[in-house]
Image (cartoon, rainbow, N blue to C red):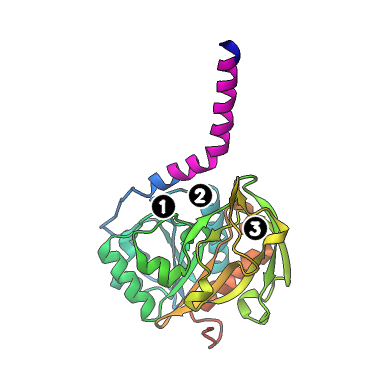
Amino acid sequence: MKRFLKWLALSAAIVIVGLGGFVAYGLYSIYFGKHVYETVAPMLPAHLNDTAILVFSKTNGYRHEDAIPAANKAIEAIARKHGWSAVFTENGAVFNPTILSRFKATVWNNTSGDTLNADQKAAFQNYIENGGGFVGIHAAGGDPHYDWAWYVQNIIGAQFLAHPLNPQFQRATIHVADDAADPIMANVPAFWSRVDEWYSFKNNPRANGVHVLATLDETTYSPKLFWKDLRMGSDHPVIWKHLVGKGRVFYSAMGHQAPAYTEPEYVSVLDRAIQWSAGLAGSDLGK
């Protein structure tokens, strides 16, 4: 009996470890049932420069506790370098027509969950379709499901599937697209090796007409969640941009860890992406 109980305990431990990733994802998904919406906007600076950006980092789901402040610090430095005004908030009530009209672009810094109510979603959609800018960082496109179909289909363009957990963070090689002259990727090598939490998506965003700027070489890391195969194949986009109506939309799947926002190459990508989304990087609207 004792031997049987030991065997049973060992078997249970193996199952628990093996299912740990899926349990974690189940708990992660539960987070996305949280629906907290602000209805009173914060006071904004009385004066904003002609180039002002709104940085939004609200989380109604999993929160990247280290990455969010690191990214905010990097974006603040970018704005200071260019002489832009930057407003940082986690209050969804800023997404109203009056406030949004004051900003050239919005940066969604590792947002998660359903962050906006119906009126705020409508205001944001109108803002983008009429020429506003969007820069989405990592978790802004990493929800396991969305209550807002327009956002995942039209803004991100791909539904997040999963990321490896064994190990979670791996070094991999990014291939910059053949049109390496794109201004957003100007300071990035053609073969870019770095460590991150690598997202896989259920669909390739190319099918939604995005202009892919960089892809992930799946032969340089292990794209598995325990026994689940996360491979997307030889075309695994990780950075892309596109137009939504008159608006410029950029998304990068990278940036889970705080050190990403001190990497000169990645900071340059974010800098140039903000410029592009705000209409400050020439007249090319991309494809």
Neighbourhood count class around disc 2 (C-alpha, 10 Å): few under 14, some 14–19, many 20 upward: many
The nearer-to-camera label among 1 and 3 is: 1
The residue positioned farthest toward the top in the image shown: 1
Point out residue 223 in the picture as x, y percentages from the top left corner: 63, 54
The secondary structure that dominates the magenta segment is: helix
220 in relation to 17, above or below: below
Q: Which element type, helix, strand or loop, lies under badge 3?
A: helix
282 is within the stretch colored magenta: no
Relative placement, left or right, of 40 versus 214 is left
Which sits earlier in the primary sequence, circle 1 or circle 2? 1
Name the residue at 34% across, 48% down: 33
Observer-nearest residue: 194 or 73?
A: 194
Point 67% across, 76% down: residue: 186
Residue 251 drawn at (x, y percent): 52, 68
Q: In which quarter of the image is the N terminus?
A: top right
Q: Which amino acid does label 2 sit on?
A: His
Q: How many C-alpha atoms fall within 10 Å of the one at disc 1: few (<14), some, or many (≥20)? A: many
Observer-nearest of 241 and 98 = 241
The residue located at (74%, 68%) in the rendering is 191
Whether the residues at callouts 1 and 2 have beta carbons within 8 Å, the answer is yes
Q: Is residue 96 above or below residue 223?
A: below
- Horizontally, is 48 left or right of 42 in the view? right
Instruction: Using the image, tell me which numbered label, if any, was put on residue 59.
Output: 1
Q: Residues within 10 Å of mark 3 (few under 14, many from 20)?
A: few
